[in-house]
Amino acid sequence: MYPPETLKKLTKLEKEIFALRLAQHLPEATYALQQLYGRRPDFDDWMQRFIGQLATAYAQRPADLRLLDLQHTHQPDWFQRPEAIGYICYVDKFAGNLKGVAEKIPYLKELGVTYLHLMPLLQPRPRPNDGGYAVQDYGRVDERLGTMTDLAELGRALRQNGISLCTDIVCNHTAEEHEWAMKAKAGDPTYQEYYFLFPDRTLPDQYGRTLRHIFPETAPGNFTHHPEIPVNGQPGAWVWTTFNNYQWDLNYGNPAVFGEMLNIILNLANQGIEVFRMDAVAFMWKQMGTNCENLPEAHAILQAFRALTQIACPGIIFKAEAIVSPQDVVPYFGTGRMAGQECELAYHNSLMVLLWSMLAEKDVVLATHSLEKMPITPPNVAWVNYVRCHDDIGWAITDENATAVGLNGFSHRSFLGEFYAGKYPTSWSRGAEFQVNPETMDRRISGAGASLAGLEAAVANNDSHQIDLAIKRFLLIHSVIFMSGGIPLLYMGDEIGLMNDYSYVEDPLRANDNRWMHRPQMDWETAAQRHDPSTIAGRLFAGMQKLVASRHERHELHAEAATAAIWTHNDKLFGLLRHSPRGRLLLLGNFSDHPQTIMGQRMTELQFGGSIRDVLTGREMVGRNNITLEPYESMWIVGF
Ligand code: GLC
């Protein structure tokens, strides 16, 4: 099955463990891979090859990571526990380089972080490289940040402090400077099969009819012309580039590509990466006549990666970066036979969008309805809940959900775009429109969380009342992500209220991508004020720490427990209920700038009519007596 010498140096027990895992996970792997390559006459050969790769990686897996495999397989809910707290940053912006990140571990521990996502850190093409999402060499760490040895050492240091390391696998595309792409450029047919190269516009035009434009302003279209590249002996090629023209989409129809990416994952797993953020997974399979997003084969690729890695390094998990509509995102946890066997984590993009929507509208009806309609998730997975990330916010609110609550989807999305760009009369936000599509008038938004929540304008106006409201707004949406099922993910600097950084406009290689405005440098001077309650940083940091500590106390918040949106019968009061045999916990959040009340009768119906306590403040109340929340206040209510 695999060359026996591969496992020669291992003990009998180690070999038996490998055989056991193979027997356990090969059926799912085969099931998934058959959907991709089952019709090929050489299917069995490819299976043998993949298994050989696993054996090699297993044999090379360092002892401490084998122990990690054991720990995680014995505690399969390690990432679902209430203690799980995430933090995301760019290595250079947070701490200069990988060694610098290790020095910041005490800071991360102050925030209770157990999961650290470092943005792309493998060798990218020279700038522009989409913030590292155009990888030139997957075998090397970006030389500005350190080496593979530094990465492995950092992983070890983090593990010793109870923090799991996560990084990106840019699996949908490579940089056009990657070795495979260079060979394809030179006309090598083997490597041309790694990508999608077309001799003329015939097929690109046919595909193009049903494709979306991801960067309509800066990289319109989905194909890039290279007159110098020969295809079938003739000069001139059109290359599939969903994102920027220097990001070449990989052809997973070719099992060699799958095998290469499998090796990349296995190698990084053996350096100590525990969580793999699988980038742009929605786009990994193409089929004529479709939008080439979320196709069943894209799911099969992820399922196959998971089943196979369970054999060599079962301590790792996958996170789907699928920023797609609510109905399309849940399947990345796996459905049907593969439920719970695809990605363990996925971004809860809908919740993020709805949080900003509730703030702008001061109304919770759309959010409550939309969350009610979300498909249910398998019990062994977790959402990653966030309010901001390094990308823009796309207003993923469906027409169907908007219509159901009496809104026009297009108008509401336009309102949110205008509101957060600061163009709406009552707006407090300082954001900017990103990639306005003139055909659909779809407009996404850039901006740091604190600036979108109103802090930047309030500080500029020296308006202490507005500063107060902005801090409360920002803490309110964090309260929801800390309470909703899954891992709350803090975006670097949000814990101290870092605002937009406009310096990117002076850098010609960044000026056309305003996502850089919300990718600031960590401000360690401001961070030094975090224990001073009279400062903005101090108030936010203490607020975040409170949420962390409150989460720790509550087993009701284990990700396995269902999260349900609740009608409070007050359109400005958001309700979210966690309920399971672990207990019941109700979040109430006032999304308006006036006090709001939930009636005692409603509290009684929700089975919180008796003695209740707000976990966040320790305040005790009687539910049937009506509960009033101050502007932007939230409560985590339990009965006692
Ligand atoms: C993901 C990243 C985004 C990048 C894109 C292409 O969506 O989050 O920043 O532009 O993939 O790699």
Image: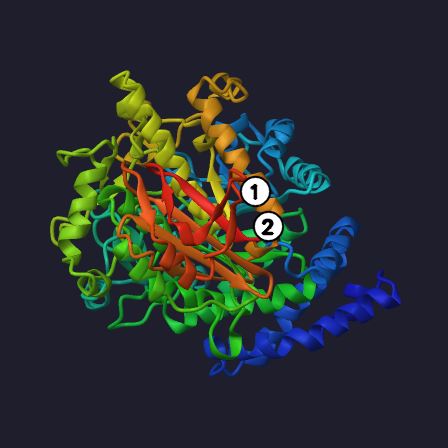
- The image shows residue 228 at horizontal and vertical percentages of 29, 50
Q: In terms of secondary structure, where does tag 2 sit? A: loop
Horizontal side of residue 395 vs 411, given as left or right: right
Spatial CA span between label 2 and label 1: 7 Å
For the image, the number of numbered tags is 2
Q: Residue at x 29, y 30 (%)?
A: 454
Residue under label 1: 550
For the residue pair 81 and 115, the one nearer the viewer reads as 81
Kind of residue sitting beneath label 1: Ser
Q: Residue at x 61, y 31 (%)?
A: 110
For the residue pair 575 and 244, the one nearer the viewer reads as 575
Is residue 552 at least partly visible in the picture? Answer: yes
Q: In terms of secondary structure, where does tag 1 sit? A: helix
Kind of residue sitting beneath label 2: Arg
For the residue pair 308 and 94, the one nearer the viewer reads as 94
For the residue pair 182 and 522, the one nearer the viewer reads as 522
Is residue 279 at least partly visible in the picture? Answer: no
Which disc is residue 554 wearing? 2
Which disc is residue 185 wearing? none
Indicate whether 319 appears above or below 416.
below
Horizontal side of residue 399 vs 476, given as left or right: left
Horizontal side of residue 518 vs 378, given as left or right: left
Q: Residue at x 54, y 40 (%)?
A: 618
| Whether label 2 touches label 1, CB < 8 Å | yes
Horizontal side of residue 19 vs 214, given as left or right: right
Quadrant showing the N terminus: bottom right
Disc 2: CA contacts within 10 A as few (<14), some (14-19) or many (>=20): some
Label 1 CB less than 8 angstroms from ligand 1: no
Indicate whether 40 appears above or below 446.
below
